[in-house]
Structures are given as C-alpha cells and as structure tokens.
Amino acid sequence: MNDSPAPSTLARGARYAAIAASLALAIGLAIPAARALAGPALIVALAAAALGVRDRPFLRGFGFTIWVFAFVAASMLYPVAFGTWYGFDLKFLIVPLVQIITFGMGTTLSLADFRRVLTAPWPVFIGMILQFSVMPVAGFLIATGFKFEPEIAAGVILIGSVSGGVASNLMVYLARGNVALSVTMTACSTLMSPLMTPFLMKMLAGRLVEIDFVAMMLEICGMIIVPILAGLVAHQILYRRRPWCERTAPLALIVTGCLLLAVLSLWFRLHATNATAALASGLLLGFALTGGVALTKLIVNVWLRFPGNWMDHVLPLVSMAGICLIIAIITSRSRNELMTVGFMLVGAAIIHNLIGYTAGYTVARACRLDERTCRTVAFEVGMQNGGMASALAMKVLQSSNAALAPAIFGPWMNVSGSILASWWHRRPVADPAAADPTL
C-alpha cells in the first residue's frame, strides 16, 4: 500500500465527496422535483467511493469492482454516451482494448513462467483439465436450467469456455497462494484457448447460435496470442538487466523496426480477407505497442534518467480503465434486455463462479496438493477471462446479447474473488516454511 500523503488526502476527500453524493442521491429519490439529481449523484457516489477506499487495506481490493459499478450505472442511465462518438461506434474499441489488456498481461510474463510447467506439471495439468471441462459444462447446464434465450445462453457457455482471467493472479497473491504458479496457469490456459474455446463452443453452443470454428480461432490468435507474444518481447525490453536495454542505439533500432513492421502489418490488414483480418490487426497493435514501450523506455529511463519501472504503475490503470469501458459499452447496448434478465444472470454468475472455486479447491485437495496450491487452483478455475468472452461475443458471434453474460460475470468474479481472498488472507498457510515470503 502506498503510504504517501497525497493518496491519503485524495482518498479522504473522495470519502467526503461520496457522502455528499449519497445525500444528493437520497434527496433525488425522496423528492420528485429533484429526481434529476439521482442519476449523476449515484455515479459520483460510486466513483468517489472507489477513490475513497484506496488507503483502506481491507477495502482496497474492492476499488476496481466499485469502478465497474460506476461505469455500469453510467451506461444504464446514459446509454447514448457509450454508443457513437462523432460517427464512430464505440463497439469497435472492444477488441483493441482487449488486445492492450492482454499485452499488459504479456509484459508480466517471462520464459521462466513457461518453464515452470516442467517443474510443477501436476497442478497445471489439474487446473487445465478443470478449466476446460467443469467450467464450460457448468455454463451449459446453467444456461439450460435457467432457460435463457439462445444468444444469452451462448454467452453463458462462452464465459465458461474461455481461459482463466488475469485478475486471478492478484487474488492468489492476496489469498497467500502461489503467485508464480498462478501466472503460469493463466498463461497456459490462454495459450490453449485458440483451440479449446472454439471447440467447446462448437460442441456446447452450436445448436443455439452459429459457431465458425476457424473464425473464432483466428480471432483469439489475433486478439490474445499475438499481444501476449508481443508482451513477452516488451518484458525483455523493460526488465532484462542487460547493457543493450539501457542504451540509445539498440532501443532506437527496436523502435524503428517495430514502426516498419507496424506499417507492413497495416498494409496486410488493408488487404486481408475476413479470415485473416483479426491476425493482421493483432500484428499491427502488437508491433505498435512493443515499439511504444521501447520508445517510452528510451525517453523516460535512458534520456530523462527516471528511476523505477513506470510500466508497473501504468498498465494496471490502463487495464482497469479498459475493462470498465468494455463493460459499459456492452451494457449500453443491451440495457433493455439486462433489465429483464439481469437478476437471473447474476444468479447464474454466482452459481457458475461457486462451482469453479469449489471444484478447483476440492479436486486439488483430493490430489494431495499443498494448501497454497489448492487456493491457487481454486482461483484459476473459478475466475474466467471476461474481456476475451465479451470481445468474442461482439466480434465473432455478432451479438450484444451474448456479451451480457461476460459483462455481468466479470464484475461478480471480482467481488467474490476479493471476498474469498480476504477470507483466506486472514488464515495463513499452516506450514510456516510454505508461506509466501512476499506477504
């Protein structure tokens, strides 16, 4: 936690603003003449509350979730604001935002994370089996049991068929789990998703909506795999302790090379067929982001001599903002449907999420894995990649109704994950030698 005076002052002021906005909300709800105050007051109260919990260790983990609620409230009350800006439909931002978020995930990975599979294959194997069996089947059974209409049901199955979510890594850290293993499992399930997600959707949701296996596979490659690989390259630029990483000439060469490759990818994108357009877009953004990272390091760290890893502060904020905007864009387009099936989808999200946590923990425990690993597997199985599911629903399934389930399941997973992580954090691992030294 940052103990500097500025965040505490900001948080304290935000709490006062949240109280004032809550009073305005109460007045707006109680007095018909002041009803126009209710909407803005609700949004301000939620945004201020998200800032106000920054210096409260127990509540800080809920800050992102409160931001999500603020954006959902804004998109429900003012859907036009998240529709079209100056003729540009904001739905076209969803895939690039997911690519940027995935690139950020890639910058946290190194080749050592993948080599870890060789040293701890059993937990990873268990997690992958549960990830791509229990979760999609649970999604299918829940969608069938709730009797959702076909497109919404396909969205429920889709959120169960994607890879693990990046937020699980933070939850594992807070829960005193094995963070290194969590990162490895997230990376492995993500790399398996181009084949497993289309296959599972074809098998489980093929009768509900049309599933194009090849289109979905290429979309995942362009949207997820290419940005992750680009992030791995950016990781070497950012964190590799080698002389070339701190010199002007090599970094300038990387920037120039990435710029040329981005231009080539743009040409490829303009001449690509529908099947390869997603791959071309992924290459374009991947080269552009990698070059941007190299250029920023050249300016910030080499020329200006600014100390520290600035990326560690920037990317979490970018990821948070991206996820909130994705959810708001989807919610604004399915506002009416959400008002009719919203509560049912919340119930479906709770059941699906609980099945994931329970299956992950109990199966890992039955396989005699240690407590830290059991907690890790629980989060990896229970928390899905809502951003990927949202983008696939909008881009491949061409359905905002199919994107409703990911938009609701995502915030709920952050709420439940924060609660479970806080509960486990107060119950340290029994074996002191197995405790995470970073906690």
Image: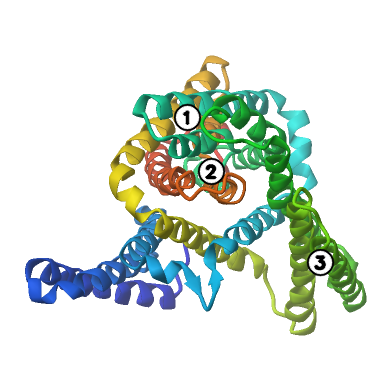
Position of 218 compared to 46: left or right? right
Query: What's the residue at 18%, 69% (across, down)?
Result: 25
Query: What's the residue at 35%, 66% (across, down)?
Result: 74
Report the mark closest to the observer, 2 or 1.
1
Q: How is the model colour-coded?
A: rainbow
Labelled disc at residue 170: none
Q: Which residue is mark 1?
A: 139
Query: What's the residue at 54%, 27% (across, down)?
Result: 207
Q: Nearer the viewer, residue 112 or 414?
A: 414
Instruction: Give me the C-alpha separation between circle 2 and circle 1.
Output: 19 Å
Disc 3 packing (10 Å; few <14; some 14–19; many ≥20): some
Instruction: Give me the C-alpha separation between circle 3 and circle 2.
Output: 34 Å
Element under label 3? helix
Q: Label 2 sits on what residue type?
A: Ser
Q: Label 1 sits on what residue type?
A: Gly
Residue 317 in the image: state x and y as whole percent: 54, 65
Residue 77 in the image: state x and y as whole percent: 30, 65
Q: Which residue is mark 3?
A: 266
Report the mark closest to the observer, 3 or 2.
3
Q: Is residue 63 above or below residue 157?
A: below
Query: What's the residue at 53%, 40% (across, down)?
Result: 384
Q: Nearer the viewer, residue 238 or 384?
A: 384
Q: Label 3 sits on what residue type?
A: Leu
Q: Which residue is mark 2?
A: 168
Position of 28 compared to 57: left or right? left
